[in-house]
Amino acid sequence: MAKVLTRRPVVAWALYDWANSAFATTVMAGFFPLFFKQYWNDAVPATVSTFRLGVTSGVTSLIVALMAPVIGAIADKGGARLKLLALFTVLGAAMTAALVLVAKGDWASAALLYGAASIGFWGGNQFYDSLLTDVAAQSEYDLVSGYGYALGYLGGGLLFAVNALMVSKPALFGIADAATAVKLSFASVAIWWLVFTVPALLFVREQRSAASLHAGRAVTAGLAELRRTFAHVRESRALLLFLLAYWFYIDGVNTIIKMAVDYGLALGFRQASLIQALLLVQFVGFPAALAFGWLGTRIGARAGILVALAVYTGVTLYAYRLDTEAEFFTLAIVIGCVQGGVQSLSRSFFGRLVPAGRAGEFFGFYNMMGKAAAILGPLLAGTVALVSGDSRLAMLSIALLFIVGGAMLLRVPYRPPDQSAGSTP
């Protein structure tokens, strides 16, 4: 285990998760939604600012979902996954840094920059995911994938902890006020993201097709290959069933991530406690993701995912009954134990279904399903809340997504990897 996780390409690859998770924690989950409402939509009704943020997120998700398989196919034909990783990283970091310059009340500029930064984040993540197959052998996928998520939780959590302290105690850092501290937090994310991407660009070696093409021909060949990939996915029972199963259960995971803070606010919990709970998930997620990577090598990725889905189903039952902040912290700990596990083992499971030399385009489909899985869960929970008038029942309804996803996953034809396989493809 230690030998695998200390190989230079593996460490460099995993550090990209450490790098871009700062955007996921400090910006996406932490300060941007609050700052967008309270600073860039100052004196605007809450319903209007919520609508504006929802439209921004929705349009961004649509763009990412549509482009993911296309750029993946083109990248494979041109042998350009590392180059595109760098391109999307620079886009995301530059747009994040530009948020520092947006004036109070200028919600349109903030929304535009955040949308562009999010495209950089998800675009880079697609090629990062696909490079798993370049740095590890099949027998190592579970362990290495978990290692990446573990470093992501640790790195994102560390910077978010510093940023949260900056915002809560700006004078301690010689900062004028909390608003300035939030803007400086965005700048720190951009720097962090760029600096810790460098090792991946230096030490990860992409396994290119023998017939890698120049840019113009790569676009034409990539689009033609994309049509064949659609046909391949439709004809492959394993791929189709897995992507459908993933769509259901990862929608449940994403819905809990998005609803947790709102659910806590609805129950009357303090905002400071909710941020602390979010930090707790990050730091629990570090050892837990490593543990799930090890578990996947012992019982198989599918069994590990099913364990995580069973825990998530229990989480929804527990959330239905919780009443105190202490219980909310318990919920955060349990979620932290399985969130990285279900994400990392899903990536490694899918990696084994991908045909050799076509990781970019197939992980494009994988990321497309991940972004499309931001619709059903919120719609289900929102409809249940509207009809029943009970936010607790809305949270409970999410269990259906884990049950359906788990049932479909059981039907995916799957053969565990040979643990005696070579160390690096």
Image (spheres, grey):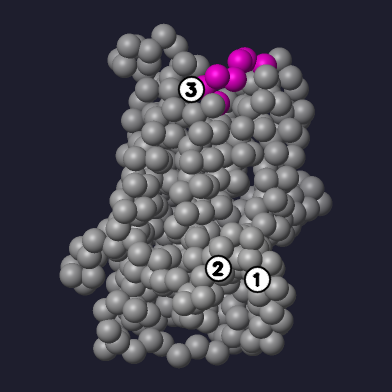
Residue 167 at x, y percent in the picture:
42, 22
Residue contact at pointers 1 and 3, CB within 8 angstroms: no
> Residue tagged by mark 2?
213
Upstream in the sequence, badge 1 or badge 2?
2
User: Element at badge 2?
Assistant: loop
> What's the distance in space between the residues labelled 1 and 2, CA to CA?
8 Å
Type of the residue with mark 2:
Leu
Residue 310 at x, y percent in the picture:
50, 71
> Residue tagged by mark 1?
221
Residue 295 at x, y percent in the picture:
33, 74
Where is residue 173, by image quadrant?
top left
- Rendered image: mark on residue 302: none
Q: Marks 1 and 3: which is nearer the front?
A: 1
Q: Is residue 35 visible?
A: yes
Type of the residue with mark 3:
Lys
Quadrant, the N terminus = bottom left
Residue contact at pointers 3 and 2, CB within 8 angstroms: no
Residue reaching furthest to the left: 3
> What's the distance in space between the residues labelled 3 and 2, CA to CA?
42 Å
Q: Badge 3, how many Cα within 10 Å: few under 14, some, many 20+?
A: many
Q: Marks 1 and 2: which is nearer the front?
A: 2
User: Element at badge 3?
Assistant: helix
Residue contact at pointers 1 and 2, CB within 8 angstroms: yes
Q: Marks 3 and 2: which is nearer the front?
A: 2
Left or right relative to 207: residue 323: right
Type of the residue with mark 1:
Ala
Upstream in the sequence, badge 3 or badge 2?
3
